[in-house]
Image (cartoon, rainbow, N blue to C red):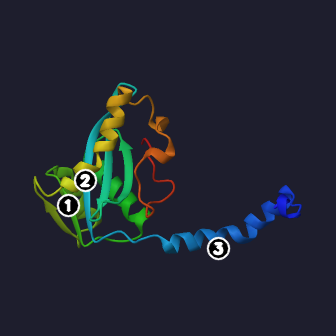
Amino acid sequence: MLERGVVVSYETVRRWCLKFGQSYAHGLCRRQPRPGGKWHLDEVFIKINGEQKYLWRAVDQDGNVLDILVQNRRDTAAARRFFRRLLKTTRTVPQVIVTDQLRSYGAAHREVMPSVEHRSHKGLNNRAENSHQPTRQRERAMKGFSAVSAEPSGSWPRSAASHPTSGPTAT
């Protein structure tokens, strides 16, 4: 703006952010595509600081990553936590969820979203499995991850529909 002859102080920019920031953010949220009705859920083992962790990932029918979560366990409580977080961040309920044959998914599904159809079969979950490939390639190149926050925020393949704070977090 200085090139156009308008002098703006930091205080003016701060006031503009307070005045227009929230409406601008809401406009961006409204333009985001809604997740599809079929969600593919999967978990994968990764090593962080030499410790084995589980990276849980949800992908919709179009291949958009809905959410990512790093946890220490792979039990029913972990699956339940992931389901609840997924419903909270996307603010929608799917028509169908597709998982691998891990029994924790079925138990968590019955508790958190019993009205949603659950398909669990060996070959159905390829979309979620393919979504893990970039993470595996980075893990091989780095010879394991050094910390949960080792990945730059822009390198996780997420869709615009995911929440800004839905990056990998350890619990």
Q: CA distance from mark 2 to mark 1?
A: 9 Å
Res 133 quadrant in image:
top left
Q: Position of residue 92 (x, y in %)?
A: 37, 71
Res 80 quadrant in image:
bottom left
Q: Residue furthest front?
A: 3
Residue behind mark 2: 128
The amino acid type, in three-letter code, at marker 1 is Val
- Asked if 167 appears above or below 63 in the picture, the reply is above
Contact (CB < 8 A) between labels 1 and 3? no
- Mark 2 or mark 3, which has the lower sequence index? 3
User: Which of the two discs, 1 and 3, sits closer to the camera?
Assistant: 3
Mark 3, other Cα within 10 Å: few <14 / some 14–19 / many ≥20: few
- Mark 1 or mark 3, which has the lower sequence index? 3
Mark 2, other Cα within 10 Å: few <14 / some 14–19 / many ≥20: many
Residue behind mark 3: 23
Q: CA distance from mark 1 to mark 3?
A: 36 Å
The amino acid type, in three-letter code, at marker 2 is Ala
The amino acid type, in three-letter code, at marker 3 is Ser
State whether residue 74 appears in this view.
no
Say what secondary structure mark 3 lies in.
Answer: helix
Q: Say left or right for 19 vs 34.
A: right
Say what secondary structure mark 2 lies in.
Answer: helix
- Mark 2 or mark 1, which has the lower sequence index? 1
Q: Position of residue 25 (x, y in %)?
A: 60, 68
Contact (CB < 8 A) between labels 2 and 1? yes
State whether residue 118 appears in this view.
yes
- Asked if 83 appears above or below 91 in the picture, the reply is above
Residue behind mark 1: 98
Say what secondary structure mark 1 lies in.
Answer: strand
Q: Residue at x 43, y 28 (%)?
A: 146
Image quarter of the N terminus: bottom right
